[in-house]
Image: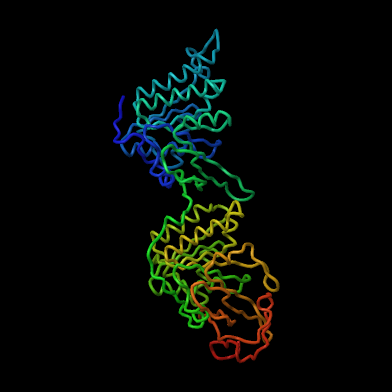
């Protein structure tokens, strides 16, 4: 049995979205790969996707199963919407587990005989089918029959050699029942891929993948998030900003509100990130929406990722303040993604943004809010690193990025759950203040790397016609301490649009 390949160990597709990029092209042809992980982490699904891709390419494919029956595999495929037509499924039942009286050993139960028979049956099936792609599920049964590390290693080596001689690309699945034997397998496998499943205190389980080794390949190391949904495993390669560069106009994106653009120098420059900080209800999302609406007016697609608000409420609120963007959503120029942090992985989050920027051409991206993003992180100590990579990527794509961060508390001393000011190119501070017996809002810019900005404090207001920013105010005290007090004249404050004092 021979299968001619143009190049030995050439990369062939895995059939799993995202995994080919991590493996620098795919699995190595004519080699044995170890896929390991605890039960329930997606090994069987990943194996079936590999074989389905082979069927599409017109290759012979064989699934040898010792742990699951053909009926169970067909049920898995049905739930994913697959047909396994074209895949040979061989249920390998060790003689000592068979209910066939002819298979029973009545005089002696020899583990040597049982192991030898099991392996022989597998090799005979491979000789019969002559497959190009094989999934062997699982090595745990071989381990149990071997009853020792030495015999187990020798049997796996024999299988590997047989596969190599017959030019088959093989995935050997293992459920990590013995850590010592797992290390033995690592040394004899061409590649080792580990799947993991993590159970947070609240929310759905999080899955991830790591390539431990792959000989002769510059694979993408580290952990990569993955999900299993109808349609199979989907892997989200970890974002590496250094791999993504493009030329873009570095000019400023304006809001259409002259006073606001003046406060920020000349607007928000493309390829920069702006952090809007303030207590809940002060108008941070409305300020970001003003820039989105202006971008849509220029014909620039935009993306809003909402952790805290449903899409329906967002559209209703936007319409109530004179920023009806429903038509843009219908046209596809504005994409609003409502995200549940309990079911989101960082990799999937980055992938969502990349798809919008690269495929839909989004030029303004709003993340509302970073508090929700924090909740999506399984390990909060790495949030700053992940956000740094994401912001660097967006900056290199020429995107105007607006981050919204809610502070704890409404008035008085306030704190943020994470310090993102050093990662942002501009920081806008918003506060409530009291004047003439009314609660009002103040806005100021405390940082901007890409140009000059005003160091003044202006009044900020939201009404049915949109966002308004007033002239610079003096006679303020206590702004940075969180309890601003205005002692100036009432005439300097913003009036209602009808001219009356607001």
Q: How many marks?
A: 0
Give the residue at the far top of this rendering.
107
In which quadrant is the N terminus drawn? top left
The residue under the point 66% across, 78% down is 479
The residue under the point 58% across, 78% down is 444
- Up the image or down, 120 lies above or below 439; here it is above
- Work out whether residue 329 can be spotted: no
Please state if 223 lies on the left or on the right of 483 as rendered.
left
Colour option used: rainbow
Give the residue at the far right of this rendering.
412
- Up the image or down, 471 lies above or below 315; here it is below
Q: Position of residue 20 (x, y in %)?
A: 40, 44
Q: Where is residue 260 in the image (x, y as percent from the top left)?
A: 51, 80
**Closer to the camera in the image, 311 or 186:** 186
Q: Where is residue 274 in the image (x, y as percent from the top left)?
A: 52, 69
In which quadrant is the C terminus drawn? bottom right
Please state if 435 lies on the left or on the right of 314 as rendered.
right
Q: Position of residue 297 (x, y in %)?
A: 40, 75
- Work out whether residue 367 can be spotted: yes
- Up the image or down, 302 lies above or below 89; here it is below
**Closer to the camera in the image, 414 or 311:** 414
């Amino acid at each position: 049995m021979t299968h001619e390949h143009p190049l030995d160990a050439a990369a062939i597709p895995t059939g799993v979205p995202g995994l080919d990029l991590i493996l620098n092209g795919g699995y190595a042809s004519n080699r044995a790969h170890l896929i390991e992980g605890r039960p329930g982490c997606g090994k069987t699904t990943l194996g079936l996707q590999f074989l389905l891709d082979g069927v599409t390419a017109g290759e012979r494919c064989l699934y040898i199963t010792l742990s699951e029956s053909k009926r169970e595999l067909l049920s898995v495929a049905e739930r994913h919407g697959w047909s396994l037509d074209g895949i040979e499924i061989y249920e390998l039942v060790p003689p000592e587990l068979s209910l066939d009286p002819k298979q029973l050993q009545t005089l002696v139960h020899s583990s040597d005989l049982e192991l030898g028979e099991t392996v022989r049956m597998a090799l005979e099936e491979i000789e019969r089918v002559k497959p190009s792609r094989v999934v062997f599920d699982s090595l745990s049964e071989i381990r149990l029959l071997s009853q020792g590390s030495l015999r187990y290693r020798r049997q796996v080596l024999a299988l590997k050699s047989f596969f190599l001689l017959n030019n088959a690309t093989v995935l050997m699945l293992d459920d990590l029942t013995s850590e010592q034997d797992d290390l033995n397998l690592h040394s004899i496998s061409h590649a080792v891929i580990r799947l993991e499943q993590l159970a947070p205190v609240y929310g759905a389980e999080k899955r991830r993948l790591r390539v431990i080794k792959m000989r002769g390949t510059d694979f993408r190391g580290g952990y990569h998030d993955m999900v299993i949904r109808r349609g199979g495993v989907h892997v989200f390669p970890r974002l590496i900003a250094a791999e993504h560069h493009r030329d873009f106009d570095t000019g400023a994106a304006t809001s259409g509100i002259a006073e606001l653009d003046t406060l920020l120098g000349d607007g928000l420059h493309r390829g920069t990130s702006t952090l809007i900080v303030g207590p809940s209800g002060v108008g941070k999302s409305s300020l970001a929406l003003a820039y989105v609406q202006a971008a849509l007016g220029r014909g620039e697609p935009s993306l809003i990722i909402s952790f805290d608000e449903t899409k329906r409420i967002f559209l209703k609120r936007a319409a109530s303040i004179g920023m009806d963007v429903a038509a843009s959503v219908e046209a596809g120029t504005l994409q609003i993604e409502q995200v549940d942090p309990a079911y989101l992985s960082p990799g999937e989050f980055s992938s969502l943004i990349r798809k919008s920027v690269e495929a839909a051409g989004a030029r303004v991206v709003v993340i509302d809010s970073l508090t929700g993003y924090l909740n999506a992180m399984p390990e909060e100590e790495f949030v700053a690193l992940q956000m740094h990579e994401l912001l660097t990527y967006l900056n290199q794509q020429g995107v105007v990025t607006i981050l919204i961060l809610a502070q704890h508390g409404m008035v008085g001393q306030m704190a943020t759950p994470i310090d993102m000011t050093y990662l942002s190119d501009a920081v806008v501070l918003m506060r409530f203040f009291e004047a003439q017996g009314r609660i009002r809002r103040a806005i100021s810019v405390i940082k901007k790397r890409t140009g000059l900005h005003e160091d003044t404090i202006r009044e900020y207001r939201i009404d049915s016609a949109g966002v308004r920013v007033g002239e610079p105010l003096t006679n303020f005290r206590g702004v940075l301490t969180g309890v601003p007090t205005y002692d100036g004249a009432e005439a300097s404050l913003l009036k209602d649009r009808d001219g009356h004092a607001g």
